[in-house]
C-alpha cells in the first residue's frame, strides 16, 4: 500500500535522521552544551535499514540521510552501501545532507554506493565567521570535503541559512563563488525550532529582503525548475547559475508536501513544524514488526497536518517547537 495522506498528497520522500550528534555546534541549530540521546535510544543499523525498506516498499522513491551529522555515525557507510543496493529496485535516489567536515574521508565510498548528489551546508566562506557560527574552526576541512566530493563525481548543492548580522552581507559573494564552480546554492530562512543560546529574532532574515538586496547586484529571473521540494528557483544572469529559495516563514510551502521525517529514535514526524508524531521504533521492536509498522504508517498518513503554522514574530519569543532541527533531521 502506497503512502497517501488525508489531503491526497502522495508521500514519496523520506528524510531519515541517523543520529542527533554532531561535530559542529551551529549557533542557530543547537546550544554549545547540547544534550545528546543515549545510544540505546537510537535506532540500530539493522533497524534503520529495515525501516527504510518498509518505506521503499510503500512507494518512497527518494531517501535522504541526515542528522545531526550523518557522517559522524560510525556504521554510516555500511548503511549507505546497503541502501544503495535498492537503487533501481524501488529507490530512484539516495542522498544525504552533511556539514562536509568528514567528506574528504568518505566521498569515494559514498559515490561508489550509488549516491549521485549530496547537499552540503555552508553558511560562510570566511574562516573566522565560520568558527564563530559553527563554534568550531572547521572551514578548511569543509572546503576540502566539498572538493573531495566533486572529485569523486558527486554533484554538490550548497545550503546556506540566511542570518541577519552574520552572513547577510556575504550572501552575494557566496552565490558567485558557488556558481563559479558549477554548484547550485539554496538559501534557507532560519526556523524557530528548539532552544538555542540566542534570540532567533536577532538573526531572522526574511528571504524576500535578501532577494531584494540580491537584485541590486544580480538579474534574477523566476525559473520553472522544481525538485519536488519546498525550494523555488531563480536563474542568476550574471553567474549563469541557479539559486534556490526556501521560505518556510514568508512563503508557506505545504501544498505539495511529499515528505515525512523520521528521527534517529524512530519517531516519525509527518510535519517538520508540527507536534504530531508516531513511534516507529516501538513498532520495529514489537512482536510483529511488519504489522505494527503498517499500522503506524497508516496512522501517520491520517494525522499529517495540512500545513505548518510556525512563525518568528518578534523578539523574546519561545521556539515554536521544543525539538531542534538536529533531532528531526533537517
Ligand atoms: N549536519 C548536517 C548539515 O548541517 O548539513 C545535516 C543536518 S542539519 C540539521 C540540516 C540543515 O538544517 C542544515 O542545512 C542546517 O543549516 C539547517 N538548519 C539547522 N537548524 C536550522 C534552523 N533552526 N532553521 C533553518 N535551518 C536550520
Ligand atoms: Fe550540526 Fe548540521 Fe546542526 Fe550545524 S546545522 S550543528 S552541522 S546538525
Image (cartoon, grey):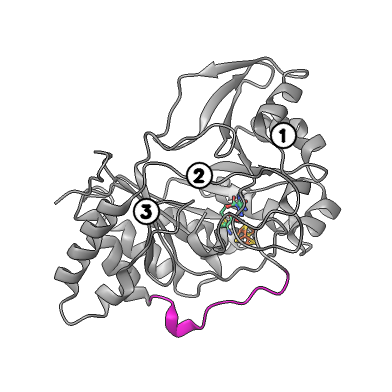
Main SS category, magenta section:
loop
**Residue ID at (62%, 77%):** 35
Q: CA distance from mark 2 to mark 3?
A: 14 Å
Camera-side residue: 210 or 173? 210
Q: Which mark is residue 270?
A: 3
**Residue at the spot 33% in from the left edge and 50% down from the top edge:** 304
Q: Is residue 256 above or below residue 110?
A: above
Q: Which residues are magenta?
A: 32-43
- The residue at the point 68 percent across, 30 percent down is 180
Image quadrant in which you'd find residue 322: bottom right
Mark 1 lies on a secondary structure that is: helix
Q: Is residue 62 left or right of residue 320?
A: left
Q: Return the mark for residue 288.
A: none
Asked whether 35 falls inside the magenta stretch, the response is yes
Mark whose residue sits in front, 1 or 2: 2
Asked which secondary structure carries label 2, the reply is: loop
Q: Position of residue 74 (x, y in %)?
A: 50, 75
- In the picture as drawn, the residue positioned furthest to the right comes out as 128
| Distance Cα–Cα, label 1 vs label 2 | 34 Å
Give the residue pinned by disc 1: 177
Instruction: Write down the residue under mark 2.
Output: 309
Judge left or right: residue 167 versus residue 44.
right
Q: Quadrant of residue 277?
A: bottom left
**View quadrant of ligand 2:** bottom right
Q: Position of residue 239 (x, y in %)?
A: 67, 22
Cβ–Cβ under 8 Å for marks 1 and 3: no
Amino acid at each position: 500500500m502506497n503512502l497517501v495522506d488525508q489531503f491526497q498528497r502522495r508521500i514519496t520522500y523520506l528524510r531519515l535522521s541517523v543520529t542527533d550528534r554532531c561535530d559542529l555546534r551551529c549557533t542557530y541549530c543547537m546550544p554549545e552544551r547540547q544534550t545528546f540521546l543515549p545510544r540505546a535510544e537510537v535506532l540500530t543499523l539493522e533497524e534503520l535499514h529495515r525501516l527504510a525498506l518498509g518505506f521503499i516498499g510503500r512507494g518512497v522513491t527518494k531517501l535522504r540521510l541526515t542528522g545531526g551529522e550523518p557522517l559522524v555515525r560510525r556504521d554510516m557507510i555500511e548503511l549507505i552501501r546497503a541502501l544503495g543496493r535498492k537503487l533501481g529496485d524501488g529507490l530512484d535516489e539516495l542522498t544525504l545532507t552533511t556539514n562536509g567536515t568528514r567528506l574528504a574521508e568518505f566521498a569515494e565510498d559514498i559515490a561508489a554506493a550509488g549516491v549521485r548528489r549530496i547537499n552540503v551546508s555552508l553558511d560562510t566562506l570566511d574562516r573566522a565567521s565560520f568558527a564563530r557560527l559553527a563554534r568550531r574552526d572547521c572551514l578548511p576541512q569543509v572546503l576540502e570535503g566539498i572538493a573531495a566530493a566533486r572529485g569523486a563525481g558527486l554533484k554538490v548543492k550548497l545550503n546556506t541559512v540566511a542570518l541577519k548580522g552574520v552572513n547577510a552581507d556575504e550572501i552575494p559573494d557566496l552565490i558567485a563563488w558557488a556558481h563559479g564552480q558549477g554548484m547550485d546554492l539554496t538559501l534557507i530562512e532560519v526556523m524557530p525550532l528548539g532552544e538555542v543560546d540566542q534570540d532567533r529574532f536577532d538573526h531572522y532574515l526574511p528571504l524576500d529582503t535578501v532577494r531584494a538586496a540580491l537584485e541590486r547586484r544580480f538579474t534574477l529571473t523566476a525559473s520553472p525548475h522544481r525538485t519536488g521540494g519546498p525550494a523555488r528557483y531563480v536563474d542568476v544572469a550574471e553567474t549563469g547559475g541557479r539559486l534556490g529559495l526556501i521560505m518556510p516563514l514568508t512563503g508557506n510551502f505545504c501544498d505539495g508536501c511529499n515528505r515525512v521525517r523520521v528521527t534517529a529514535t524512530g519517531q516519525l514526524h509527518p510535519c517538520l513544524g508540527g507536534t504530531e508524531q508516531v513511534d516507529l521504533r516501538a513498532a520495529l521492536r514489537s512482536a510483529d514488526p511488519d504489522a505494527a509498522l503498517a499500522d503506524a504508517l497508516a496512522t501517520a498518513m491520517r494525522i499529517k497536518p495540512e500545513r505548518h503554522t510556525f512563525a518568528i514574530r518578534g523578539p523574546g519569543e519561545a521556539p515554536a517547537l521544543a525539538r531542534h532541527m538536529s533531532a528531526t533531521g533537517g
